């Protein structure tokens, strides 16, 4: 058995953190590469962990396979749902602790983790608990002497590789629908934020799930993650993260034609028409890029404003940015911006800011690190940007926005779609027809009208183009975690 370590959280709470690999309902010592998870606020190491080696990955997949073939496949669907309700209850009971763990490990605000990530995780488990026994196939009319019906069956063992920006919430999005459909899972959290996922192993034991239904292995992407994505006995790989890693996972999945769901990067636009509710458009576009310190795949990082209101919009946007410019202690209620996840991301975001300054974009707000300790970055507003600039074309994944003006609807629709990404898009207008017509023209998996950043466990989430393949959440995830079996019955047709 692997040891646990007592961790003192910044809010004064203490808890026992499991450090091993959670395989077959036990925490076992990993035998792979060692890695550290740090607090992005203090820049200090929280814990050193030994990741899962290829052998550990084999063991986790074998445990998931055994559970899939054994106890899990024998359960009535409503009992799978009952386990998910138990997990939901346990998540709710441990809500404060899990939010504090994620805030400590990730650097995000504790209040955001509590009311964003944890509430969502709880609801996702409840939603799929209720869905477990409502998965249905169909019967199809063929001929009077024949009957054909279709059953939706689970895929088998699902590998799930998640990122660091919403550690526990991403776990919920992945595990809950997979289990509801009757699959078993091996999940790998990001190496920057492994703590809450490993802790979840305790809840799996407490909920009494059969051993091997949920396995959690930590480790680095190129070793542990890659071994999991390549594994010959894995039936599906579900991934959230960068488009570059998504592509390599898809290649790995080709080895045995695994089913894939990929949710990758974005450079999502906001379009503000002159007839929009002005104040609301400013506030929603600000929220759309700055929430979660800009570390959101769907963040609306490009804002296009109709020429006649451009100057006024920019002025008010900067005021709202200033009003919310509370960077710092992520356990303080008043803080808006926590720290960026890592030194790598911090340097990457600052690099984009420097590139923006050099490229001739006008820096109106921020543009530097905040304070002298921790990976904090000032909210940053560039205006008068042009479409060829790197800061307009590439995903920055930080609190950095670019704003420019447009004259016509055709022009702005072209600019919005002129990207390899297609995750989300927001538009602001009080004209109902224009709203729906423009929504139709935008190449994105999600469009927000007079809003931004909305996601809901009942609504499909995913992207067009290089932003991904497949959809998570809602009933769409039930398709993503099942496969159709067609059964042809001969009722008496003779040869
Ligand atoms: P990443 O995509 O490399 O990491 C995400 C997950 O994939 C982690 O669990 C990681 O261990 C795993 N991984 C990495 N390489 C792998 C491989 N070869 N095989 C299997 N698994 C692998 O993202 P990273 O490097 O942390 O961040 C880079 C950029 O990705 C960010 O700057 C941001 O632009 C984007 N990103 C997008 C996210 C989203 O929600 N769509 C979330 C996090 C990052
Ligand atoms: Mg960390």
Image: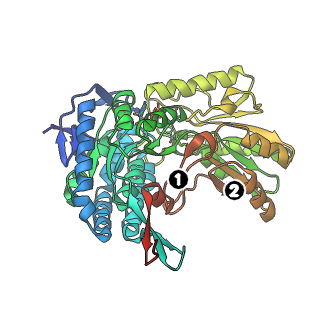
Regarding mark 1 in the picture, which secondary structure is present there?
loop
Q: Position of residue 237 (x, y in %)?
A: 41, 44
Q: Earlier in the sequence, mark 1 or mark 2?
A: 2
Q: Which mark is residue 471?
A: 1
Q: Residues within 10 Å of mark 2 (few under 14, many from 20)?
A: few
The type of colouring in the image is: rainbow
Asked whether, in this view, residue 396 is left or right of residue 406, the answer is left
Residue drawn at point x = 46 percent, y = 41 percent: 165
Q: Nearer the viewer, mark 1 or mark 2?
A: 1
When asked about the image quadrant of residue 487, the answer is bottom left
Q: Is residue 435 visible?
A: yes
When asked about the image quadrant of residue 176, the answer is bottom left
Regarding mark 2 in the picture, which secondary structure is present there?
helix
**Quadrant (top left, top right, bottom left, bottom right) of the N terminus:** top left
Tally the numbered discs.
2
Q: Which mark is residue 280?
A: 2
Q: Position of residue 293 (x, y in %)?
A: 52, 40
Residue drawn at point x = 68 percent, y = 25 percent: 356
Q: Nearer the viewer, residue 398 or 412?
A: 412
> Does residue 352 lie above or below 112 as drawn?
above
Q: Nearer the viewer, residue 323 or 311?
A: 311
């Amino acid at each position: 058995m692997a040891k646990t370590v007592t961790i003192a959280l910044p809010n004064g709470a203490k808890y026992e953190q499991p450090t091993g690999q959670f395989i077959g309902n036990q925490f076992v010592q990993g035998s792979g590469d060692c890695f550290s998870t740090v607090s992005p606020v203090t820049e200090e190491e929280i814990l050193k962990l030994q990741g899962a080696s290829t052998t550990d990955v084999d063991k986790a997949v074998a445990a998931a396979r055994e559970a899939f073939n054994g106890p899990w496949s024998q359960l009535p669907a409503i009992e799978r749902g009952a386990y998910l309700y138990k997990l939901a209850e346990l998540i709710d009971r441990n809500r404060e602790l899990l939010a504090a763990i994620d805030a400590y490990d990730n650097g995000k605000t504790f209040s955001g983790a509590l009311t964003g990530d944890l509430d969502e995780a709880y609801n996702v488990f409840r939603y799929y608990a209720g869905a477990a026994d409502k998965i249905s196939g169909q019967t199809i009319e063929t001929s009077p002497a024949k009957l054909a019906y279709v059953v939706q069956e689970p895929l088998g063992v699902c590998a799930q590789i998640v990122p660091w920006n919403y550690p526990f919430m991403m776990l919920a999005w992945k595990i809950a629908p997979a289990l509801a459909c009757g699959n078993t899972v091996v999940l790998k959290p990001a190496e920057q934020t492994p703590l809450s996922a490993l802790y979840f192993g305790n809840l799996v034991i407490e909920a009494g799930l059969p051993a091997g239904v949920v396995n959690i292995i930590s480790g680095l992407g190129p070793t542990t993650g890659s071994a999991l994505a390549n594994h010959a006995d894995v039936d599906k790989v579900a991934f959230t993260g960068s488009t570059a890693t998504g592509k390599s996972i898809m290649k790995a999945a080709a080895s045995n034609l695994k089913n894939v769901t990929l949710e990758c990067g974005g450079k999502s636009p906001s379009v503000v028409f002159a007839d929009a509710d002005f104040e609301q458009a400013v506030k929603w576009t600000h929220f759309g890029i700055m929430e979660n310190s800009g570390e959101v795949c769907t963040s609306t990082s490009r804002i296009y404003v109709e020429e006649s209101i451009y100057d006024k919009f920019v002025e008010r946007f900067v005021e709202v940015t200033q009003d919310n410019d509370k960077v710092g202690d992520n356990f303080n209620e008043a803080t808006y911006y926590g720290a960026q996840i890592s030194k790598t991301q911090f340097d990457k975001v600052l690099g984009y800011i420097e590139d923006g300054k050099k490229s001739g974009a006008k820096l109106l707000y921020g543009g530097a690190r905040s304070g002298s300790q921790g990976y904090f970055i000032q909210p940053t507003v560039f205006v008068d940007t042009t479409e060829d600039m790197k800061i307009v074309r590439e995903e920055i994944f930080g609190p950095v926005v670019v704003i420019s003006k447009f004259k016509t609807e055709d022009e702005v629709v072209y600019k919005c779609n002129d990207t390899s990404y297609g995750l989300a898009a927001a538009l602001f207008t009080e004209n109902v027809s224009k709203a729906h017509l423009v929504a139709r023209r935008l190449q994105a998996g999600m469009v927000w009208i007079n809003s931004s950043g909305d996601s809901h466990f009942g609504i499909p989430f995913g992207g067009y183009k290089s932003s991904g393949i497949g959809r998570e959440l809602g009933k769409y995830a039930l398709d993503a975690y099942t496969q159709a079996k067609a059964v042809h019955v001969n009722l008496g047709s003779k040869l």
